[in-house]
Image (cartoon, coloured by chain):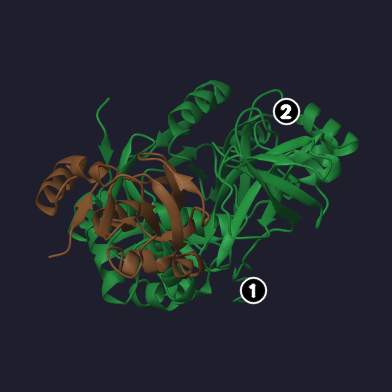
Amino acid sequence: MSDVKYSKEHEWIKLEGDIATIGITKHATEMLGDIVFTELPEKGTSVEKDGTAGVVESTKAASDVYTPISGEVVDTNQAIVDDPSKINQDPENSAWFFKLKVKDKSEMESLMNKEDYDKFAKESSS
Amino acid sequence: MEIKKTSLYKLHQNNNAKFVEFAGYQMPIQYSDGIVEEHKYTRMHSGIFDVSHMGQLFIYGENNLTEDLEKIFPLDLKNLKINHSKYSFLMNDEAGIYDDLIVTKLEKGFLIILNAACKENDFKILSKLLNGKYEMLLDEKRSLIAIQGPKSVKILNNIIQGVEDLNFMSGNWFSFHDQKIYVTRSGYTGEDGFEVSISNELSEKFTKDLIDKGAKLIGLGARDTLRLEAGLCLYGHELNKDKTPVEANLKWAISKDRVSKGNFIGSNIITKQLNDGVSKIRVGIKPEGKVIAREKTKIFNQSDLHIGEITSGTFGPSVNGPVAMGYVENEFSKKDTKVFLEVRGKKYPANICGLPFYKKSYVKGVNK
């Protein structure tokens, strides 16, 4: 089992060494509907925990994407910018948003595990 | 106030609709396929829209009714043939738009289709203007179902024989299970299609028949992307009581003959604006990149002056890119004028463009 954690803003984060991969959850994509536009942070920029780090837009509305952890952006997923519908198809795997070089791993501790997130998502949508 | 439901509410539920409150009604925003697929299905095939929240106002009366309605609407109603329809406006004295609507001439009166959010207020205004002289019925016992898209004519004609002979913006009474239904060839998606006024009891059966023949239920989300690609106005966005039909670039809907004679509500302002021009006007706006500029986005010219605002903006699934409409100062309204749209603090290039974004496929001259 890899160490995947979840935020209350419906992002997932997977930590491997000191590199974190971040995306939005399947539950988030179901709430948003068809995603038609994505904006990602630029490589080399520093982002702060709970700060905005991108935008996703459905036909209906725009939503900010937040980073659940602080760090420096080391990679972004151009494929989801070119074809945002990929996010609806495979949100928690190939349609990741950006990778961070993590500043402080202890920030992971405040995030939810899968079980807690599923419960949270179910409650927040009812 | 209790939220209202249309006669198709259960059918929407059984088809996994996601609901939103719209104008006091619980309405389907989308079904399981999602807005993009629903949009494309309508363009390629046939979509069913529950528009029963819209007002169906029947007004019956003798000859004076036509004259009295001409004092209200800028239409040549005397020369409107029975079963023919015209797009028009209910305006205030300053020509500000209370509602945009469709007037159809019936044998003994008129049927006026009103926006859901405006219908109660329209009814009050019209009752007052007509002074109780005529029978007026805002019919809540009838549903309104639109079927839109290239395959709609075949599908509907299978169920209601003869609708294929209707021309765009005309209608007639037909029969469905021994009840009278009124069908017009019209709609608000830019596609060929029909709107069917049918009793609440039969609406579900009728809709299920359409589904059996291959049409799919489509939500309000796709209705919005379809109408925006077709360059059609939505009340509360492009239109409101601070905008006139001339400013909304809808002067084609105003009868020239009626303008020359005046004597309808708002005619002074309309005449003045037609002669002198307007300071702001509705235009189509095509962003150069992928960024979507939504309602209230500020528009700037090349010298960074604020020249207008977006009234509707979204991603157009058939255009496969962002589309928008808005109001700009008249001198910047020419096609191909370069403008900038401020989205999340950054300015993105866009061009003023002609409407529609997606070619309309209305059917005219099918018969006789």
Q: Secondary structure at mark 2?
A: loop
Q: Residue visible at 14% across and 54% down?
A: A114
Image position of A89 (left or right of B358): left
Q: Is residue A39 left or right of residue B278?
A: left
Looking at the image, which residue is at 83% across and 40% down?
B330
Residue A125 x %, y %? 20, 44
Q: Chain of mark 1?
A: B
What chain is the green one? B
At label 2, which amino acid type do we have?
Answer: Gly
Q: Can you tell which chain is drawn brown? A: A
Same-subunit check for callouts 2 and 1: yes
Residue at the spot of label 1: B365
Q: Position of residue A65 (x, y in %)?
A: 40, 48
Image location (x, y in percent) of residue B313: 57, 49
In the image, A15 versus B302, the foreground residue is A15
Q: Residues within 10 Å of mark 2 (few under 14, many from 20)?
A: many
Where, quadrant-wise, is the C terminus of chain B in this rendering?
A: bottom right
**What residue sits right under mark 2 in the picture?**
B266
- Quadrant of the image occupied by residue B203: bottom left
Left/right of residue B268 with respect to residue A36 in the rendered view: right
Q: Is residue B263 above or below residue B295?
A: above
Height in image: B195 above or below B248? below
Choose top left, top right, bottom left or bottom right for residue B287. bottom right
- Asked if the residues shown at circle 2 and circle 1 are in contact, with their CB atoms under 8 angstroms apart, the answer is no
Spot the residue most to the right.
Answer: B276
Vertical relation: B248 (above or below) B38: above
Q: CA distance from mark 2 to mark 1?
A: 34 Å
The quarter of the image holding the N terminus of chain B is: top left
Q: Answer whether residue B47 is visible to the viewer in this image.
A: no
Amino acid type assigned to the residue bearing label 1 in the image: Gly
- Figure check: B354 above or below B233: below
